[in-house]
Every structure is written in structure tokens, then in C-alpha cells.
Image (tube, coloured by chain):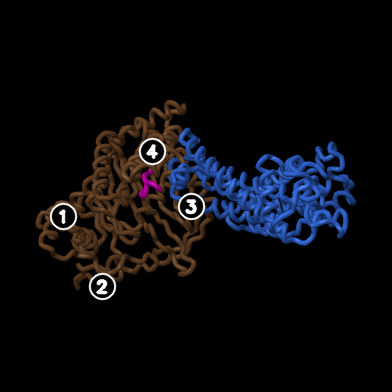
Chain colours: A blue, B brown
Amino acid sequence: MQTSALKPIARLLTKELLIAVLLLLGVSLVVFFILYLAPGNPFATLAGKRAGSNWHQIQDNEPSGAWYAQYLHWLGRVVQGDLGHSTRSGLPVFNEVIKTGLNTAFLTIGSILLTLLLAVPIAVYTARKGLTAIGWGLTAGSYILAALPSFWFGYIVIYICIHQFGVFPLAFGADASQWRGIYFLLPVLVLGLCSGTLSEMVRYLREELSRVLTEDYIRTARAKGASIWKHALREGFVLPVTEMVAAKIPFVLGGAVVVEQVFNWPGMGRLAWQAAQDRDFPMIMGITLMAAVFVRTGSLIKQVVHICVNPRASQE
Amino acid sequence: MNYLPILKIEDLCTYFYSRSKQAFIRSVDHVGLQIAKGQTLGLVGESGSGKSVTALSIMGLVRGEPGVISGSIELNTPEGGINLLQGLGLHVRIHRDNGRIMQVAKDADAWEKTADRNLRGIRGKQIAMIFQDPKNAMNPFVAVGRQIAEAVRLNTAVAGHREARARALHWLAQVRIDSPQLRYHNNPHGLSGGMCQRAMIAMALAAEPVVLIADEPTTGLDATIQSHIVDLMGDLKDELALTTLLISHDIDVIRSLADTVAVMYGGTIMQQGPVQAVLGDTGTQHPYTAALLDSIPDQRLIRSKGYLQAIRGDVLDTMNIPAGCRFYPRCNKVDDTIRAQCRDQEPALINIAGGHRVRCWRFAQARPYSGRAAVHAMQRN
């Protein structure tokens, strides 16, 4: 965390920015091409079969062309900061993506925090005590939870809460003021438990922590009367947690699509689902870019943490 | 000052259990040692003879089952004496057969709890330890200076961060590290192996311990650095009047630093006494010690391009300790008059002169010798 970490971080940020630009180009190109190949078009869904197959033509009075010409046209507008308008709602894509993106970020971060909240104590307990009966039970429990399909578990949770207890209203996000309260807890709970991340986190954190606890320098820490947990914190905890969170963001985002659908959560996942149904091409492109930025940001944060914790990583 | 050893180990046993072989690994088997104030005790032996496990047993750092199972480790500090294994006998049941430990039932959790309680305020504070392979033995994520300052804050009266830092810089200078101000901020991987070992020594000394345990402090360093570290430890011994348990397989290191020496083989002490008597040219050596000395190349041998005398056979497998002398299968000094004894009966450590003890039937034969007679024997050769 000393000043020596600042230079490598600055270097990393420049490198990452460059990579991010290339990555966004690549991702958008691939997705655009897939959309071009995909059957259907926005106006067929809106206006029926008679609609033309070229969405630029109608939206912007632009001439149609080969797919790469359409891509370059789209790219030219994106560079100017214009992601276009939704073919379905006519709203600007950028605003929609940011608005729903924040909701999804909220859901994703919340559920990852919940996963950590469960995974860390289990991992620490089993790393310390070994697989005792309790440790084994906790580990098995984490596997079972991770194996539950979130769409099914989501409906079960809704059913239990609403029909048995009458606790949660059905219409999440129907009213902007309504989902501010505790209503966001259910989707966070379901995504946190069932995204498949929990068991992997438990396993990875346990392996890393128990490996680090047998390192020579931990023995030295005991020999000098220091806390082994304090010394194991960086390598045995901070590094694997950031590693795992960064690696799991894409999976959790994928899980969010389903969970948002189940809970009618006004997030990017539900928007993506809708946009795919509607062949809302500008929206799909916008969401794709946003998701790529999400994932890349996660990995960037991970790398910054690594540099701060482990000065060796910065000297490569 | 009365002669009271600072550290006195008696009958220490540290075993491990091999599940696959269903047998005990008797890493430390009835070991007794003592170190007087300001003295350095050298512990020599081949790899696997139980030297390091002895050190770890003293520090309560043995991992694995059953671990330490019996003995006493007495530490006499100016504040009084305590037995580090006090009260641990309650948590272990040992079944002996013919004097040999055949079964151990140990309540590991209770044992560890009691041991940790016994060692509170001792480990790190009264007894500090230097490990081999300093780059891995120091926390790779923390600047060495801060690790030393941590040892200062934990184990001395200095509590403030600023004063601890000043003390750490003092210790870095004490172990002859150039520009300690700069090195303070280096992580272990930013230092050379020799420097890192110096920092490790500084960290142990920073606690101002009563006893210092150095486990192979020169192993893994190249030859010139080794000799620098040996010189440093010699200087520190004089400057700080350290009481040290020095573990090494390098007899030259032991010769230049130790006052007394104990030779370990197969988990037990074969010979102990003053350095001159045990490692000198006296002829009163245990056959194992003699064989160890013969296996060191000296200048005459190198010049004459002769062959090095290796000890025949392999290091004792401590899972199958023979009924007789542990060294009997490899011994080249057995003659027919004592062969049966060597094979069937384990010799005791026999005092052949003041404080010089040997575990060998050849010397038991000479039991009627008085101390003076033993001195004669030494001079004869």
C-alpha cells in the first residue's frame, strides 16, 4: 500500500484501458455479426412479417448495406457517444442501460456479498478444523444450494414468502418507491445462494487458506508469538477472495438474467431478455457493451488489489 | 553464579504415526539436552536424525500426530523456572512394552490448549527461533523492517510504533545490514539470501530472547555467504552473550560456534560433551561421530585426491528401530567381544569424563574408568 504501488497501478490502468477498447471492439463485432445472422428483426416483431429487414433504414433513414457497413455505421455513432434508441420503446439505449445497469450492479454485488458472507465462515471453519461432521455438513450444504436451479428456487421462495407468510408483495419494482425497502432481499438471496458460486467459493477459499496456513512464514509467525491469521490474511484471504469475485462476475451476471425475470426486477438482465425477444438490436448491443465493462471492471479491481497486496506482482 | 542450565530437556519423545505403514516414526526418542547461560550447544547429525523436530518440539510447533508425547523442557529465566510441558502428561496415555513405547493415546486438542497456555509469553519472547530458507520463512508480503518491528512490539516493553521502528533499525544495523533505512522497506524477495537471513536473525534477536534456537541458519546459502553468517553469529554471541541451540549438519559451523555439542542419530543422542572432546582428535568418539568426521573432506585428502569416506548403509529408518544399538547395522567398529551386546541391547549414555557422554558398548566396557582414566584414553591417541 506504499507509494511504491502507485506507479505500477498507473501503468496497469493505461494497459487495461487499451485492452478494454480492443475488447469492446471485439465483443461488439462478434455480437453484431451474430445478430446479423440471427433470424428475425425488430420490425417483424413489431409490425409483422411485412416489415423490412433493415432497421437502420427505418430508424435513421440510412441506406442499408453489407453487415460490416452497418457495423461501421453503428460504431461511428457509438464513438460519438450515441448508442441509438430502442426499437421497441424508442427510449435512448444509453439511459436505459445505465438505469437498469445500476439495478443489476446492486443485485449482483449484493448477491456476491451474501455468497461471501456464507462462504468465508464455512471456508475458515473447515480450513481450521478439517472436514469434521459439522464441516462436512456445511460443505455438502453449500454444494446442494449451488446445485439448485435459481428459477425453480426463486418461485419456491416467492411461494413460501407470499403464500405462507404473506410477507413480500408480488410486484417488485412496479413502483419505484416500493422496492427500496426490504423487497430487494429476495432476489439477492436467491442469486446469492443459487448462482453456483457458493460451493466453488467455499472450496477455493478453503484450499487456499489451508495451503497458506502450512507455509513456512506462518510457522515463523507462530514462533515469534504473532497472530497467524493476521499473517495469513493477505495470501490466504484477500487474494483468493478478489480472485474468486472477479472470476465469478460473469456467471453471476448470467444468473441475474434468470433471477430478474423471476422476480420482475428492473435490471439489465430482464432488459436483455426482453431485447432478445424483441430483436431490439440497439438495446442488445448496448447491454453487451455494458456487461463487458462490468466484467472488465471486476478484473481491474482484482488486479489493483493484487498489486497493493503483493508487491511482487507489480514487478513483472 | 550457580550452574543452572537455562534450558534443560529431559526424556523428550516426539513421534509421528504413519497410517500407511501402521508404525511410529520415532523422530525424537528420549532426548536429553542442556544449555548453560551464554553457551552455544551444537546439535549435529545427518538429515532425518531428528534435529529440527527437537527444535520444533521446544517451540511447540510440531505439526502432525501424535507429536510430542513425553518429557520435560525446563526453561530457567531470571524470573524463575518453568516446565514447558507442564501438565501435559494428563492428556496422553502411553503403553510401554519392554521399555519401548508401543501405543499412544493423545487428546491432541487438550494437549495443544495446555501447551499454548504454557508457551504464552515464552514462545517468541523468551525463546526465539531462526529458520532455514529465510525467503520462505519470512512473510513475503510484508517489508522486513515491519516484521522486525512487529517482533519488537509483541515481545519487548516497547509498544509504540515509532520506537519499535527505531529498535528494528537498530537490529538491522546490529546484524550488519548496509543502509538499514532503505532495507527496512524491502520485502524478503527484494533482499539477497544472505541479507534475508540477516534480517531473520535480527527478527529473532529483536525479541531479546533468553534462548535462541537457530535451525540450519546457513543451509541453502552459498559458501561465502555461509561464512559471513557464521562470522556474524560468532560476533553476536560475544556481543550479546547469547544462549543458543545451534542446529546444523555442517560440522565446521558447529566447530566454530558451539561450546558443547550433541550428536544425534536415529532420533536420539549418541554422544555429547565439550566440542574439543567430541569433535576433536581425541579417539574417544562414538563410532558414528568418528564416521561423520571421516566423511568431511580435509585439505590433505583433497590434495592427495583420495576417496572420501562415506558412512556405509542408509540413515536409520526410525520406524524400525533395532533392538540393540541404533548404529549397529552401519557400525564399522564392532568387534566380536561386544557384537552380541551391540546387536541385542541398547547402550545407555555413559559418562566417560566430566560432561562427556557416549552411547556405545565400547565405552561401557571401560566403565570402571574414572574420569582421569578417560582423559588418559584421550591423550593416548
Which numbered mark, 1 or 4, is in the foreground of this view?
Answer: 4
Label 3: element kind: loop
Residue placed under numbered mark 4 in the picture: B203
Q: Chain of mark 1?
A: B
Q: CA distance from mark 1 to mark 3?
A: 48 Å
Sooner in the amino-acid sequence: mark 2 or mark 1: 2
Location of residue B212 (image quadrant)? top left
Q: Name the amino acid, label 4.
A: Met
Q: Name the amino acid, label 3.
A: Thr
Residue placed under numbered mark 1 in the picture: B374
Which numbered mark, 3 or 2, is in the foreground of this view?
Answer: 3
Q: Nearer the viewer, residue A99 or A150?
A: A99
- Give the residue at x 82% y 44%: A90
Q: Give a yes or no on whether discs 3 and 2 share a subunit.
A: no
CB within 8 Å, label 3 to label 2: no
Sooner in the amino-acid sequence: mark 2 or mark 4: 4
Q: Name the amino acid, label 2.
A: Ala
